[in-house]
Image (cartoon, helix red, strand yellow):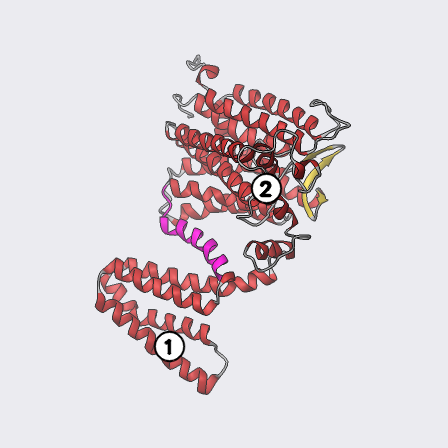
Amino acid sequence: MKRSVNIWNGIDKISILLFLILALMGWVSIYAAVYNDEHTGLFDFSQRYGKQFIWIIASMVIAVFIVIIDNRFYFFFSWFIYGACMLLLILVLIFGKEINGARSWFEFGGFSLQPSELAKFGTALALASYLNNKRQDLTRLNVIIPASSIIVFPALLTGLQPDMGSSVVYFSLFIVLFREGMSPYIFVSGLLSVVLFFLTLLTNNLYLTIILICIAITLVWFATRKWKLVATGSIIFIFFTGLLYLLDHFVFKAIGNELVIFISLVLSGVVCALYVYNKRAISVLIIYLFLIGSIIFVNTVDYTFNNILPAHQKDRVNILLGFKSDLHGTGYNVNQSIISIGSGGFLGKGFLQGTQTKFKFVPKQSSDFIFCTIGEEWGFLGSAIVIGIYLFLLLRLIKLAERQRSDFSRIYGYCVASILFTHIFLNIGMAVGLVPVIGIPLPFLSYGGSSLWGFTILLFIFLRLDASRTEYLV
């Protein structure tokens, strides 16, 4: 049957325009970041900006190629693409070239390829395909677990390289699961784990545990509005805590206050279990399980932080939290980036006039720290414009996702928005010292062919699906 949709008329021109603007801004910013008086030509292919220009042209060719392919290709071959991407992530661990302590790249002569950048769109396709087939019933564990596995598997493979920045990005796809019906308790627990991680490093574990218990008691009252229940539960907990404390103080002398509190909570839960069962107090059970899980998490963070997290990443977290100052070592990049952005003022110093940029004070200024070049030369106004363009693109993608007739297309659209949002938030947050340095590119602006092509493929697959939104995939 002859297709009734003109793809070029149906494709979203606004998103394409935003893509081109960002790519052009990136090219100009890279030129400024690595400017050399001996190589002043914008099209000098021996320099990074010359290579970026080639990659931009190649990304446009890739975009056209993606658009002319039948939209059903991405639906029917989503699992094949995902499998190929996972194979590349495995092979790079064996045959990849190690750069800066990470085995994340394939090198073919003078050309390098980073599979983790390409695996993001493969993971998004697989997740969209799986949820489409299961009709988004994310209230059942037999749907949540496989969906989570699709996300976690590439994240683990990427973390083994190790490339923690890209690994974190995959977890942004849990936002999509939340949008598609996953319990808010699961989603909120993930956010709380991040907050608790930093709170544990900032405060004493015993004090934090007591605060969590007080919060849980307050939540139980809000959920039930029964003072007698709250008072009875508190008395039972205090009784067990006092008894165990005395036993530990006079007999065992080895349990410790934190373990005394945890055991008391478990015993209190056992005593109150009959009430929860008879009254079907599900909200009380959920709050209790959250409390137990949070306390376990809090008391394992120290071990994880001190024994599992790599030394350089521990240093970055300690610098972010103010526990350590290393302006000439681990904290050098962030400190210089903040100086660069702050020195730009409101309007910036002008194109090619940035002193921090010109004298190469910030390492990786054309890639991970490209935003500090924008901040210094274009100032607050230019930085706000760039962030505004990103915000406009994200809102546009959400709008396009919501108008899809196909569940597959809608879910994939939200995957695109989630991945781009996480990259933008982490990269800019890293440049201004709000998040630890984890090495992550700024979409369409940072130097690098793999990241630019990965983002281009990610975006234009969705634009291709949107262009045929009035058609059924199957």
Residue that appears at 34% across and 60% down = 287
Residue 103 in picture, x, y percent from top left:
68, 45
The image quarter in which residue 375 lies: top right
User: Eyeballing the image, is 222 above or below 41?
Assistant: below
**Please, what secondary structure does the residue beneath circle 2 have?**
loop
Q: Between residues 382 and 173, which one lies in front from this camera angle? A: 382
Q: Between residues 174 and 340, which one lies in front from this camera angle? A: 340
- Please name the amino acid that badge 1 sits on: Thr
Question: What stretch of residues is rendered in magenta?
Answer: 181-200
Q: Is residue 228 left or right of residue 164?
A: left
Residue that appears at 45% across and 72% down = 258
Q: Is residue 446 left or right of residue 463?
A: right
Q: Is residue 241 left or right of residue 342?
A: left
Instruction: Please tell me how crowded label 2 is: few (under 14), some (14-19), or many (20+) other residues with Cα within 10 Å.
Output: many
Which label lies toward us, 2 or 1? Answer: 2
Residue 151 in picture, x, y percent from top left:
50, 44
- Residue 190 in the magenta stretch? The answer is yes
Label of residue 60 in the image: none
Q: Quadrant of the N terminus?
A: top left
Residue position marked by numbered label 2 in the rendering: 440
Residue that appears at 41% across and 13% down = 4
Measure the alpha-carbon separation of dots 2 and 1. Answer: 46 Å
Q: Is residue 263 left or right of residue 40?
A: left
Residue position marked by numbered label 1 in the rendering: 241
- Please name the amino acid that badge 2 sits on: Ile
**Please, what secondary structure does the residue beneath circle 1 have?**
helix
